[in-house]
Amino acid sequence: MTLEHPLIPSASPLTSSLDGLKRLEDAGAPAVVLASLFEEQVDLQHELAESIRHQGAEAYAEAVSYFPPLREYRVQADEYLELVEGARRRLGIPVIASLNGCTSGGWVGYASRLERAGAHALELNLYHLAADPERSGAEVEQRYLEIVQGVRQQIHIPLAVKLGPQLSSPVHFVRQLEKAGASAVVIWNRFYQCNLDLEQLEVVPHLELSRSYEMLSALTWTAVMFARVGLDLAVTGGAHTVEDVLKALMAGASAVQMASELLLHGPERLSQLVLELGHWMREREYLSVEQLKGSMSQQRVAEPAVYLRANYLRTLQYGGERWRG
């Protein structure tokens, strides 16, 4: 997709309603990633549909009251399709649907329904904590590739894959995703962590908005991947300032996704960042975002080894001098 600028609102509460999506478009969003439809919601829809089909199966034919009203079995998967359809009708910018899961369940086939509903593209959010001691990293990654291949067979629209950072060889794996049919990868998915409540002795969910320093891993791997893979790269998780956006673009990103900054300051913050980006580029005589992209990637900096182990000792020395001082 050709976008007016590279700042894309990512999946968040702001992109879960038509009103929020319209506010983002009015603020200058070039595209939007809808809040995710979760695998569990799609599975629930299949389970409910099956329960309806067998409801009252052992009853007499005259007992028509055993068949429940269908309105009671309306679940969020249907509502999500309506959100895609409504956004396609109401917005003049590309609408990117988002599927969140980790198995090849019913939601793989659901991808084609999202395409028919009007999604311009699909972001596949592979959210999986590899905690099974019987499964190797290679098996987990192979499963990911099978999911991407299965989804690719269902749709013809662009397909982005949102990855977590727990990969043994990220550049190699992204190349494999490209062969499996991915159009782009989004680096990195934030795996939300649990916390422990010491008073109630319970495991509780824990959510904090991102901060700029969280981008560092994504910047590193984007810079390493740029020009080594054939698909587009997007950075997410930690973009708050125009400096964050510029770093992502110079590392090699084609797009920068953001949510936390917009949740903190409202959709109007997006238009401000776009103005700041344009001002920075004009001051330094950059003619286009394409000219920025990848200009500080590993292959284009004077010392490519700084992205790898060669910079490790220097980082430790810098940190030691800083804290001693």
Image: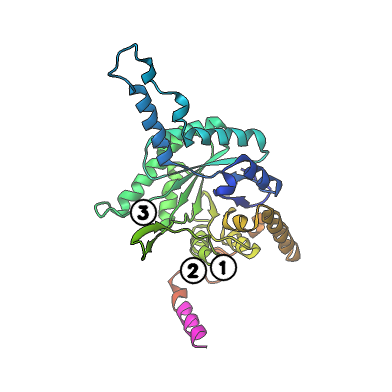
Q: Residue 129, labelled with which disc?
A: 3
Question: Residue shown at 53%/60% (left/top)?
Answer: 209
Quick check: marks 1 and 3 in contact, CB under 8 Å?
no
Give how far across and how far down residue 296 sits, in percent: 58, 65
The residue singled out by tag 1 in the image is 301
Earlier-in-chain disc, 1 versus 2: 1
Magenta-tinted stretch = 314-325
Residue 61 versus residue 245 in the image, above or below: above
Q: Residue at x 67, y 46 (%)?
A: 23
Earlier-in-chain disc, 1 versus 3: 3
Q: CA distance from mark 1 to mark 2?
A: 10 Å
| The stretch drawn in magenta includes residue 324 | yes
Q: As shown in the figure, which amino acid type bears the numbered disc 1?
A: Val
User: Which x, y percent locates residue 25?
Assistant: 68, 45
Furthest residue in direction bottom, as rendered: 325
**Quadrant in which the N terminus is drawn:** top right
Front-most of 27 and 73?
73
Q: Which residue is mark 2?
A: 307
- Amino acid tagged 3: Leu
Residue 120 shown in magenta: no
The answer to whether residue 156 is seen in the rendering is: no
